[in-house]
Image (cartoon, rainbow, N blue to C red):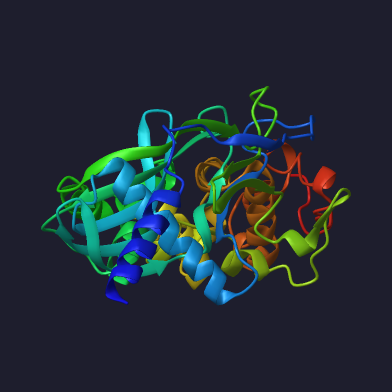
Amino acid sequence: MGFRRLIAGLVLVLSQSTISNADEFTAVTRPSFADVEPRLVYGLVSYDFAFAGKDGAARSQSASAFLQSLIKSRFQNKSGNYIVSLDVAIGDKMIATEPIMSATWESSKFLFITTSEKSNIVINRNGVLVDDIVVDSDTNRISISMKVRYSSNTSVDMSLLTELSQLAKTASLAGLSPGVQAVSEAYAPFATILTKILSKYTDVSIVDNTTGAFTLLDEGFANQLRYNGSNFKVNIYLKTLNSQLPTNFSPIGFKISNFSLPLTEVKSGVGAARAPVIDLIAAGTDRVGVFVKAIAEGSTIGSPKPASETEIRDSCASLRTRLNKFVTSRDAALLYWSFLRSFHTELSRYKDGAKCGRGDLVEDLAALNLQLGAEDWPAQ
């Protein structure tokens, strides 16, 4: 009976398909919306990862077969810890290393026949790789690869690795936004820790770097990518969002009855460092931060000089410029409109406060259906 099991195991091993040399993702769909300009939309990259099978038991068997084939074809059946990841880069900057599968493999050999095998497999089947990145000429193209990493003496819990990956991604994505450089610096140590951990692993590509694009700012790239293995499939989706308040936006512009909503719901940053844009600006100690904080708190700028003798139009202009560093051009306009509507009474106390709602500071609002009452912002 033992000999039959041994032969059956050998047949199973020999019948399993091996992983071929690294390939590329294939294009499924391409961007179609041509009327796009830099910083008009946000980009979101998500994935799903599925094994073949009609039920859980069959899919689990496919996952085990994938693992065994990978270890035997690429790592000579070595015992140790294995991590399968999706790696995301923008230009030459690594943005995210997302673990999608972690396994510990142990085997004892008798001559050339594996007589006993044990594997513990943990799988993330879907997730978000990049979220709310402002799409421009630098961030439109995303490179994605799929790798397996091996270590004989390092083992990291999947949940801990995933959390560390998220913190490292916070630093990388924040570094792409001029408005939240301090966040990038604060979270940089986590990226360093992740890099040190992964440096203890030997990595091999399953799928080589393949470039996709969110929009037609770059032509010829897909916005959905797929890799079909012998018993598994990976989909990568590059999607765009018109606004952080998508249900309030349509082709005719914004429709918002609660004009203070954007001040709390339009945010910047990633993960634990994500916060309302207005709060991030007000937390600063520069002239714009002091201005926004004073208006929000109802304190007078330039004290002891009275508000009626203090000019703030230039501060409003600086605020508009600052908003564009955090979010898309649409949401920057939305935030400025919300700021004017929410703090109209406070702004009107100042000598030239009405100018904050006039002229070139608000010339793009009407096209987005963001209306201001002329009686509230009279010409001066």
Q: Pick whichever, 119 or 242, lies toward us.
A: 119
Name the image quarter holding residue 103: bottom left
Q: Pick whichever, 10 or 379, lies toward us.
A: 10
The number of numbered discs placed on residues in the rendered structure image is 0
168 relative to 63, above or below: above
Name the image quarter holding residue 293: bottom left
Q: Residue furthest top?
A: 219
On the image, the x and y values in percent for residue 325 come to 50, 42
**What residue sits 73% from the left and 35% below the top?**
31
Q: On the picture, is 71 further left or further right than 140? A: left
Image quarter hosting the N terminus: bottom left
133 relative to 341, above or below: above
Q: Pick whichever, 250 or 311, lies toward us.
A: 250
On the image, the x and y values in percent for residue 236 come to 58, 47
**What residue sits 76% from the left and 40% below the top?**
364
On the image, the x and y values in percent for residue 67 come to 38, 56
Q: On the picture, is 242 further left or further right than 47? A: right
Q: Pick whichever, 375 or 94, lies toward us.
A: 94
153 relative to 90, above or below: below
Q: On the picture, is 6 further left or further right than 46? A: left
Q: Is residue 119 visible?
A: no
Image quarter hosting the C terminus: top right
Q: Residue furthest right?
A: 252
Q: Is residue 137 visible?
A: yes
On the image, the x and y values in percent for residue 18 come to 42, 43
